[in-house]
Image (cartoon, grey):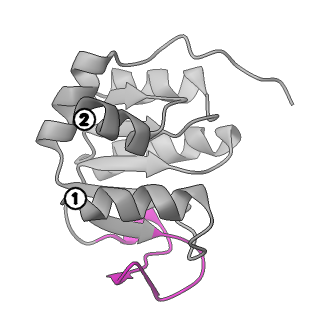
Amino acid sequence: MECEFPTINANMDEIKEIFESVKTIAVLGLSPNPQKDSHRVAEYLQSVGYKIVPVYPKEDEILGEKVYRSLKEIPFEVDMVNIFRKPAALDAIADACIERGDVKVFWAQKGIVNNEAVQKARDAGMKVVQNQCAMVDHRQLNS
């Protein structure tokens, strides 16, 4: 597997604006396991007031929220996708976000880089963040 360096990314001013503007965050790859990063990050974001929408292939409920099997299944507006998936999955996720038409922010968590996918999302009008942790950035901006 080849590791990519993120050549496209938001700066901290843009990230601050993201956190001030989004309300609903679909977390792709949200594990029901409290020890997993996806669970801890989603739980934190939920605790500071964001509506979390779990997207996971199993489970019916995570963090007290209904689980959807795909982004396409979510029947209401999603402001941001927070992605805990392998970099190769980002191309299809970018396509799903573009197809939805309502996603404003495409966020790939720490360790996840796919410059081609984020460029596609950016070209479609989304703000993009990759290889950064939403929980760490939110805490840093609000400390």
Mark 1 or mark 2: which comes first in sequence? 1
The answer, for residue 9, to whether it is visible in the render is: yes
Residue 74, quarter of the rendered image: bottom left
Q: Specify the principal SS of the magenta part.
A: loop
Picture residue at 30% right of the left edge, 39% below the top: 138
Please name whichever residue, 93 or 105, is drawn nearer the observer in this view of the structure. Answer: 105
Amino acid on which disc 1 is placed = Tyr
Q: Which residue is mark 1?
A: 50
Residue 104, compared with residue 6, is above or below; it is below
| Disc 1, SS | loop
* Left or right side of 73 for 130: right
Instruction: Verify whether residue 64 appears in magenta.
Output: yes
Q: Which residues are magenta?
A: 55-74
Picture residue at 41% right of the left edge, 60% below the top: 42
Picture residue at 57% right of the left edge, 36% below the top: 110
Outermost residue, top direction? Answer: 7
Q: Which residue is mark 2?
A: 143
Instruction: Verify whether residue 48 appears in magenta.
Output: no
Residue 77, quarter of the rendered image: bottom left
Give the image location of residue 18, x and y in percent: 22, 34
Name the front one of labels 1 and 2. 2
The answer, for residue 28, to whether it is visible in the render is: no
Outermost residue, right direction? Answer: 1
| Disc 2, SS | loop
The residue carrying pointer 1 sits among few (fewer than 14), some (14 to 19) or many (20 or more) residues within 10 Å by Cα, namely some
